[in-house]
Image (cartoon, grey):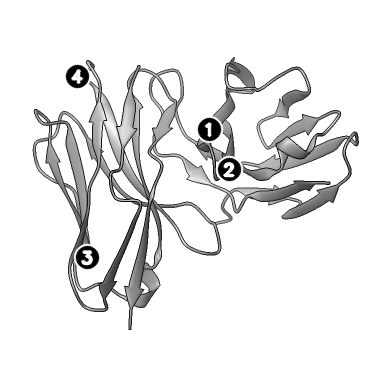
């Protein structure tokens, strides 16, 4: 059974460019989470979806960040325009449940983003 | 707001030894889950063990076990017969119910020495 799939695994871009990160959750899971990991701030939850609906986006740093989940098997996190301080590892995780009934979250391999 | 504190930024032990990683948390809630995640150099986040707060019995998974002290708000991880593959960053995490959000500690970097 495939785990959470993220692409690309590595992304290097220049400041001002648009970046799109992609995630395919585990089949059957109905909650999806986007995290950012940096040395300074550790692991931070950016946004999470339940049944394709955004439930909590309070962790999204600013308007440059947006996330979508058009269907149960795909989500994107977009940064436009990107800045050097966005450099981090971005994780996607999924779980079954949601709305107070989520089970354990399973993480993807992460995307290492470098903004020059 | 809930907080998770891991007081040991880094630890080293010899292979085959037993090591305990500390974690404390602060909450006024009674219904919550606690987790330990492992992040090896590959950076993949791997669930090690999970504990439901309403269960008094400590969770175990093979060589991994926890000491859950609810009154003290302590959730330590014990690794028995440590192996080189246990070298990783270990994160303690808290999930308040009915929320689905996880709050992570800053992590403990564990080195298993040959």
Identify the residue under disc 2.
Answer: A38
Q: Are marks 1 and 2 in contact (CB under 8 Å)?
A: yes
At 53% from the left and 36% from the top, the residue drawn is A41
Cα–Cα gap, marks 4 and 3: 28 Å
The answer to which of B5 and A93 lies nearer the viewer is: B5
At 19% from the left and 19% from the top, the residue drawn is B30
Give the label on residue B70, or none: none
At 28% from the left and 32% from the top, the residue drawn is B33
Give the label on residue A44, or none: 1
Question: What chain letter is assigned to the residue under label 3?
Answer: B
Secondary structure state at the residue bearing disc 2: strand
At 63% from the left and 50% from the top, the residue drawn is A110
Identify the residue under disc 4.
Answer: B30
Q: Position of residue B105 (x, y in %)?
A: 38, 38
Q: Are marks 2 and 3 in contact (CB under 8 Å)?
A: no
Dot 2 crowding, Cα within 10 Å, few <14, some 14–19, many 20+: some
Q: Are marks 1 and 3 in contact (CB under 8 Å)?
A: no
Identify the residue under disc 3.
Answer: B63
Q: Position of residue B113 (x, y in %)?
A: 33, 78
Question: What chain letter is assigned to the residue under label 4?
Answer: B
Dot 1 crowding, Cα within 10 Å, few <14, some 14–19, many 20+: some
Dot 4 crowding, Cα within 10 Å, few <14, some 14–19, many 20+: few
Question: What chain letter is assigned to the residue under label 1?
Answer: A
The answer to whether residue A30 of the structure is visible from this angle is no
Cα–Cα gap, marks 1 and 3: 29 Å
Give the quarter of the image for residue B53.
Answer: top left
Cα–Cα gap, marks 4 and 2: 31 Å
> Can you say whether B4 is above or below B89 in the image?
above
In this picture, residue B12 sits left or right of residue A65: left
Cα–Cα gap, marks 2 and 3: 30 Å
Cα–Cα gap, marks 1 and 2: 9 Å
Q: Earlier in the sequence, mark 1 or mark 2?
A: 2
């Amino acid at each position: 059974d495939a785990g959470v799939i993220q692409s690309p695994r590595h992304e290097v871009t220049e400041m001002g460019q648009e970046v799109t990160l992609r995630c395919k959750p585990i089949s059957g899971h109905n909650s999806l989470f986007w995290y950012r990991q940096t040395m300074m701030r550790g692991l931070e939850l950016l946004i999470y979806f339940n049944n394709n609906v955004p439930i909590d986006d309070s962790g999204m740093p600013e308007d440059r960040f947006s996330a979508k989940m058009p269907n149960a098997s795909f989500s994107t996190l977009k940064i436009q325009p990107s800045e050097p301080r966005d450099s981090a590892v971005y994780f996607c995780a999924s779980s079954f449940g949601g709305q107070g009934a989520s089970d354990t979250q399973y993480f993807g391999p992460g995307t290492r983003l470098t903004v020059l | 707001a809930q907080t998770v504190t891991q007081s040991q930024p880094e630890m080293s032990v010899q292979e085959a030894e037993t090591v305990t990683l500390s974690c404390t948390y602060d909450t006024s809630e009674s219904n919550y889950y606690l987790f330990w995640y492992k992040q090896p150099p590959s950076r993949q986040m791997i669930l090690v063990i999970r504990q439901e707060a309403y269960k008094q019995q400590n969770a175990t998974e093979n060589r991994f076990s926890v000491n859950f002290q609810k009154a003290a708000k302590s959730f330590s991880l014990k690794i028995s017969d440590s192996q080189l593959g246990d070298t990783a960053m270990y994160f303690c995490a808290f999930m308040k119910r009915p929320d689905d959000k996880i709050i992570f500690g800053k992590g403990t970097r564990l080195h298993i020495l040959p």
